[in-house]
Image (tube, coloured by chain):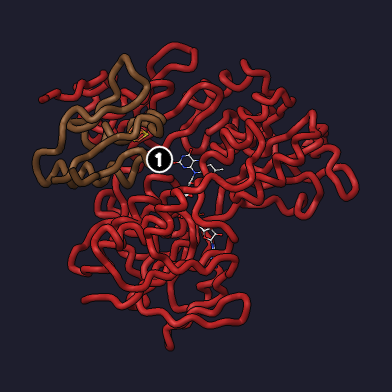
Amino acid sequence: MTAASVTVVGASLAGLATAEGLRRQGFDGVIRVVGEEPWLPYDRPPLSKDVLKTGPAEHPPYLRSEQAFADLQVEWVLGRRCIALNAGDRTLSLDDGSVLPFHLLVVATGARPRRLAPLDGVGGVHVLRSWDDDVALAGDVAHASTVVVVGGGFIGCEVASSLRHRGIDVTIVEPFPTLLFGPLGAEIGERLNRMHSDRGVQLVLGATVSGYRGGNRVEAVVLEDGRELAADVVVLGLGAVPNTEWLQDSGIACDNGVLCDATGRTEVDGVYAVGDVARPESSLYGRRVRVEHWTSASMQGAAVAMTLLDPQARGELVRVPYFWSDQYDTRLNYVGLHERTDRVLVRGSDGDAWQAAWERDGVITAAVASGDPRLLPAMRKALGQPVETHWPIERSRATRVS
Amino acid sequence: MREVVVDQKKCLAYGVCMMTEPAVFDLPDDDDVAHVVRQPENDDEWANTIEAVVQCPAAAIAIVDV
Ligand SMILES: Cc1cc2nc3c(=O)[nH]c(=O)nc-3n(C[C@H](O)[C@H](O)[C@H](O)COP(=O)(O)OP(=O)(O)OC[C@H]3O[C@@H](n4cnc5c(N)ncnc54)[C@H](O)[C@@H]3O)c2cc1C
Ligand code: SF4
């Protein structure tokens, strides 16, 4: 089947990767990309890292050069939100009242930060997902001396690290006993606790925020046990929820993401989903997986592009997940997918350089290393291998044939 | 003929490329950026190399016509 046109909803990484994948395979039909934000696709990881350390520039860190965007020949419909997908007449309704017909459609609407009801709409309280969020946050912290970060996940930890870089006093409030407890567990979390407290971050663990003190603007957050933590600025790092509400009456099933088959196909013919918003089946993991990593969004866009042009291609969206996180001068690299019940093995000094792996039934399911990207190939290779032969993970050298 | 190249000014040493196709990419001990140690030699290696292009968070890898 040759498609006459492909429409993508969501003008970010997964949407861009879809368009690029189509062009790479020689598709010369119309590609239209609708995006709620006014910007061409830009990179989100720097928002919590370098951009927050230095304060924002005039425009977001675009994913491509002006020339590369132009070469793609995409019809961008920016600053427009899709409010409905009408499967019957195959149209999209936009927030300005216009209606766009579509032929093949890719949903790449990503996710948005979870908020905290008692702090909703209060001045000085921020989330961080978009360039606009970053500009607002950076503007506000420029005059702040004390910042409270609510949630010790990746975004919270990276924000804390970037704000420490600017000499700001930072407190992280985290309901679990360690930072990154949910994604990485207590043993690794303790190392992160140390890393952050060594850099002067105040950790308030096992605590939840129930409210705030102040008028229109926050002066302190109030914890459930009544304690108050002074704050000029509050940053919420409570995870993200997939942007699926606009699909409510579309006939597409959503449950913590757009439910789709392994190739991204939804229940509506010719409509696919990719990136943070997608929750595809995975033959690799034998269940549905919604991954919120940069490389996954990029790969899923490339994979769905192949399926759009050749439905027989059956390229699976879910590959072995990989992500990184930069905190202070250290980069964490994680590869694989572990369950909370997997046993964790940790090796390395107490400092910022260490490695860990998870095992289930004697087989390695995931690995993470702090401070050494050169371990990655060996980490990747260790997945699915027995613990006895592949732990600890040793550097493997590329076979040089030159 | 096509050839894969790493723009070493853009590379940020994520190591994704050497994980994706270790026969082609490497981060040498004595350098902070990835190197192409040799060109892909078969379809599999080319497929992995194209995957590395897509996965490189710094958009530092390109396939060029030579
Ligand atoms: C601060 C920050 C730091 C990060 N750091 C890392 C990192 O270090 N490593 C890593 O692996 N990953 C990181 N990530 C995650 C990574 O950026 C995401 O996985 C990636 O952006 C997902 O891309 P996406 O295109 O699926 O979704 P998104 O980037 O969320 O894009 C979705 C787009 O769709 C638009 N949209 C939503 N609804 C509609 C609608 N109804 N109509 C039109 N447009 C709509 C949105 O405005 C948005 O522009 C980070 C994310 C953030 C926010
Ligand atoms: S994936 Fe890209 S940024 Fe990372 S080491 Fe390879 S070329 Fe450099």
Which chain, by letter, is brown?
A: B
Residue A147 vs A248, above or below: the answer is: above
Q: In percent of the image, x 90 and y 48: which residue is there?
A: A215
**Chain A colour in the picture:** red
Relative horizontal placement of residue A149, taking residue A43 as reference (left or right):
right
Q: Position of residue B17 (x, y in %)?
A: 29, 35
Quadrant hosting residue A14 = bottom left
Q: Is mark 1 within 8 Å of ligand 2?
A: yes
Answer yes or no: is residue A342 visible: yes
Quadrant hosting residue A155 = top right
Q: In percent of the image, x 83 and y 43: which residue is there?
A: A218
Which residue lies under the disc numbered 1?
B57
Q: In percent of the image, x 32 and y 47: which residue is there?
A: B54
Q: Position of residue A269 (x, y in %)?
A: 33, 78
Residue A394 vs A290, above or below: the answer is: above
Q: Position of residue A213 (x, y in %)?
A: 87, 42
Subunit under mark 1: B
Relative horizontal placement of residue A184, taking residue A201 as reference (left or right):
left
Q: In percent of the image, x 50 and y 48: which residue is there?
A: A62
Relative horizontal placement of residue A116, taking residue A184 as reference (left or right):
right
